[in-house]
């Protein structure tokens, strides 16, 4: 009984709350400025099963719909991406750049699916579109030629592979040559460091030998001076002794 009463209370509480919720758009004054197209609907989730209708897409900007297509294609939902791209083509006819890019993206999706005939329809539409961006025309022309001339493209691809392999081989040879030169340079640096260390050791030994030689020379000079003093004293003593003997005699 208690659980039943609690459920009844929860039901009436929830109902009362839903009744007082109001749509903010209904409360907006007539003089209020309209919101931008990005505020009409929340950010699109490409994982959602919900797909906005054409009427809703027509209220958005072409860039917004292109973003929705790109987000769908990024997770490999090519069907959803095609839906958005084709709607851009149908809805935003006055936006030449958006229509051109939508045609290119739709054509590229079909091209990746090996649906060449369908892809050519979109690429040719770009080439016939006046004022289309140069980039889209160049890309469309390149892929259209690739589809219509598969043998030429195969030959071109083979040549491209040969050039790539040659470049790769040359790069490998160059890398090996650089590695050898770096190895030789490192060896020379080690030899130079060893020679420098040896030279420093010899210089230190030469300085020690020179200091020892100076010290030995000073000691020898002091010794000789002391000996000279002793000899002089001895000579003086002998002279005094001789003089004394002479006087006594």
Image (spheres, rainbow, N blue to C red):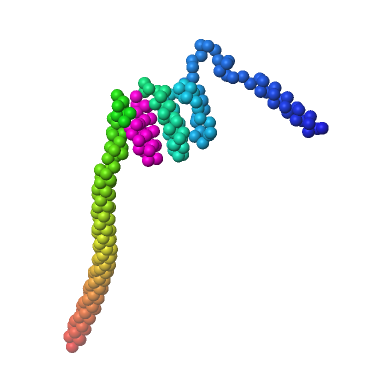
Residue 106 is covered by the magenta coloring: yes
Range of the magenta residues? 96-123
Q: Residue sitting at 37 percent across and 27 percent down?
A: 99
- Answer whether residue 74 is visible to the viewer in this image: yes
- Image coords of residue 113 (percent x, y): 39, 40
- Answer whether residue 160 is visible to the viewer in this image: no
Q: Residue furthest top?
A: 31
Q: Residue sitting at 46 percent across and 33 percent down?
A: 80
Q: Residue sitting at 34 percent across and 24 percent down?
A: 96
Q: Main secondary structure of the magenta part?
A: helix
**Going by the image, does 168 lie left or right of 118?**
left
Q: Residue furthest front?
A: 117
User: In this rendering, is residue 242 above or below 145?
Assistant: below
User: In this rendering, is residue 148 above or below 164?
Assistant: above
- Image coords of residue 137 (percent x, y): 29, 31
- Image coords of residue 229 (percent x, y): 23, 76
- Image coords of residue 116 (percent x, y): 35, 38
Q: Using the rendered view, name the quadrant where residue 239 is placed.
A: bottom left
């Amino acid at each position: 009984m208690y659980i039943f009463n609690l459920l009844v209370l929860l039901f009436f509480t929830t109902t009362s709350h839903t009744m007082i919720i109001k749509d903010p758009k209904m409360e907006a004054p007539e003089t209020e400025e309209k919101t931008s197209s990005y505020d009409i609907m929340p950010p699109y989730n490409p994982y959602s099963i919900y797909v906005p209708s054409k009427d809703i897409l027509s209220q958005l900007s072409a860039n917004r719909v292109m973003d929705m297509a790109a987000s769908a294609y990024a997770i490999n939902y090519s069907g959803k991406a095609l839906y958005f791209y084709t709607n851009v083509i149908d809805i935003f006819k006055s936006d030449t750049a958006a229509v051109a890019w939508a045609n290119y993206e739709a054509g590229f999706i079909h091209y990746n699916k090996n649906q060449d005939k369908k892809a050519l329809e979109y690429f040719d539409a770009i080439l016939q579109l006046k004022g289309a961006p140069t980039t889209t025309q160049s890309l469309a022309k390149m892929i259209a030629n690739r589809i219509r001339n598969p043998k030429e493209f195969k030959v071109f691809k083979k040549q491209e592979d040969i050039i790539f392999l040659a470049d790769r081989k040359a790069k490998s040879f160059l890398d090996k040559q650089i590695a050898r030169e770096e190895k030789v340079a490192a060896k020379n640096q080690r030899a130079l460091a060893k020679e420098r260390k040896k030279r420093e050791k010899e210089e230190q030994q030469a300085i020690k030998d020179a200091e020892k030689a100076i010290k030995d020379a000073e000691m020898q000079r002091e010794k000789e001076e002391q000996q000279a003093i002793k000899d002089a004293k001895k000579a003086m003593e002998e002279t005094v002794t001789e003089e004394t003997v002479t006087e006594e005699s």
